[in-house]
Amino acid sequence: MTSDDSETFEKQFHKPPILRLYPYTDDINQTIEPTQDTDDETLSDMTLENEIIEPIHEPSLEIVGTAHISEKSIETVRQTIHEKRPEIVAIELDLPRYQRLIDESNGIVHEDKLDLKSMLKSSNMIVTLVTAFLSNAQKRMGEDVGVKPGSEMLEAAKIAQEVNADVALIDRNIQITLKRTIQGMSLKEKITFLWEFTVSYFSGDDEELMEEDIEQLKQEDTIQEVMNFFKETSPGGYNSLVHERDAYMAYHLKSLEENNVVAVVGAGHKQGIQKFLDEPETIPSRESLSYVKESRFSITKIILYMIPILFIIIFIVAFFQGINIEGGLLNYVLFAGTGAFLGSILSGSKIQSAIVAFLVAPITVIHPLLAAGWFSGLVEGKLRKVGFDDLNELGSFESLSDLWHNKLFRVILVVLGTNLGCTIGVIVTINNVFLPYLHTIFGI
């Protein structure tokens, strides 16, 4: 690569969000707001007097691989930052996760209105559930060793203040990561993941996790073995959760290469990040790694559109063939509505939600962009007065009983139950209404 090529290549990299938290104070629990400096996406905090330590201004990069629930990782982070005195401490967080960790450590609870309508859309609902289950699993492991998940990241931000270093948030937004993960996984991978996670979580055979177990997971050979197994069993999940994030964080670290940087990342990402940094021409653009595909055409969508069209065509053809369709229409309404009603009730809904499910099911069946469960779920959410506290508590369950008593989880169950019941009702309709019509019309 020539010097001209190198110069052009360097311009492709843009800096990550940067927090200026120094000089050091005892309180890093501040709400972060973007500044007007949009070129390098710098986020600024209040500036105080009496600087204590001057960072070393020499281009350097030290990557610290950690376990997110390890006390020894916290000690390593603390020691490395003090020794290196970096200009920038880069951490494996995005702005929302960083702010959430800060708020949790300071006991801050947000009372913003929960957008339940948006959350109940299928993709968002899945992301919500996956996030809750994964955060709860990490929380439980952290409790075994007495360390809260993300403690080493908060410690890195705190020590950054002590050495007057900026904090760079180099990871991809967690919502984008989860959406790309779900889109990238095959149906088999999703089913396998759901089954394995459910079995391991509720098997009741969990052994107490020891600090030694955590440290063993940080060993390079162990990490490589785990990563290879993950890649083999779920290539789609591995690509989004590991490989893409390696590239994303390497992209941001590449943009900071003129600075003295200490990067604090999960041990499983260290090798991948370093490989991308060694071969920067292989790092994809940040835009390509942040894009969430909104597929306009797919086999699933075609089927969803074809079903109502076929239903309508069959009724029209039957009518012009002189077949009395009143009974068929009534059966269609009853089967679809009753299926949705029973699905809602059996999933634990209130009677008002089930009635709404019954009324809207026949309409939503012939409208490919609507689902009966959305309507019953919205009613259920209003009746149960679901709020942000229910979303926060969704990731803090200790048992199935805790999940059952979480109002948001109950609403999600109602959505799933209603949709499942409605689908069963449609299948019954096909067998008892449309197949007889087809037999009469076409003799098949």
Image (cartoon, rainbow, N blue to C red):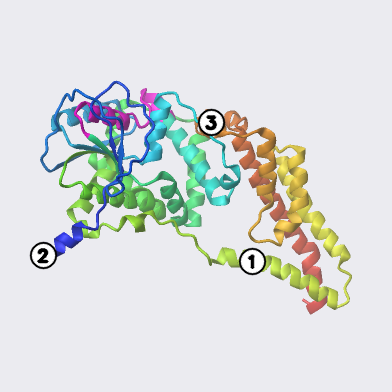
Which numbered disc, 3 or 1, marks the residue closer to the eye?
3
Identify the amino acid type marked 2.
Thr
Residue found 21% across the figure and 24% down from its top: 49
Relative to 327, residue 32 above or below: above
Q: Is residue 203 visible?
A: no
Residue found 67% across the figure and 50% down from its top: 419
- How crowded pointer 2 is (Cα within 10 Å; few <14, some 14-19, many 20+) is rated as few
Task: Tell me which numbered mark, 3 or 1, is placed earlier along the sequence.
Answer: 3
Residue position marked by numbered label 2 in the rendering: 2
Residue position marked by numbered label 3 in the rendering: 111
Identify the amino acid type marked 3.
Glu
**Mark 1 element type:** helix
Identify the amino acid type marked 1.
Tyr
Task: Tell me which numbered mark, 2 or 3, is placed earlier along the sequence.
Answer: 2
Which numbered disc, 2 or 1, marks the residue closer to the eye?
2
Residue found 11% across the figure and 35% down from its top: 56
Secondary structure character of the magenta stretch overall? helix
> The N terminus lies in which quarter of the figure?
bottom left
- Nearest to the observer: residue 68 or residue 162: 162
Task: Tell me which numbered mark, 2 or 1, is placed earlier along the sequence.
Answer: 2
**Residue at mark 2 to residue at mark 3: CA–CA distance:** 55 Å
- How crowded pointer 1 is (Cα within 10 Å; few <14, some 14-19, many 20+) is rated as some
Corner quadrant of residue 64: top left
**Residue at mark 3 to residue at mark 1: CA–CA distance:** 39 Å
Within the magenta stretch, is there residue 160? yes
Q: Which range is magenta?
A: 140-165
- Nearest to the observer: residue 173 or residue 428: 173
- Nearest to the observer: residue 234 or residue 108: 108
Residue position marked by numbered label 1 in the rendering: 305
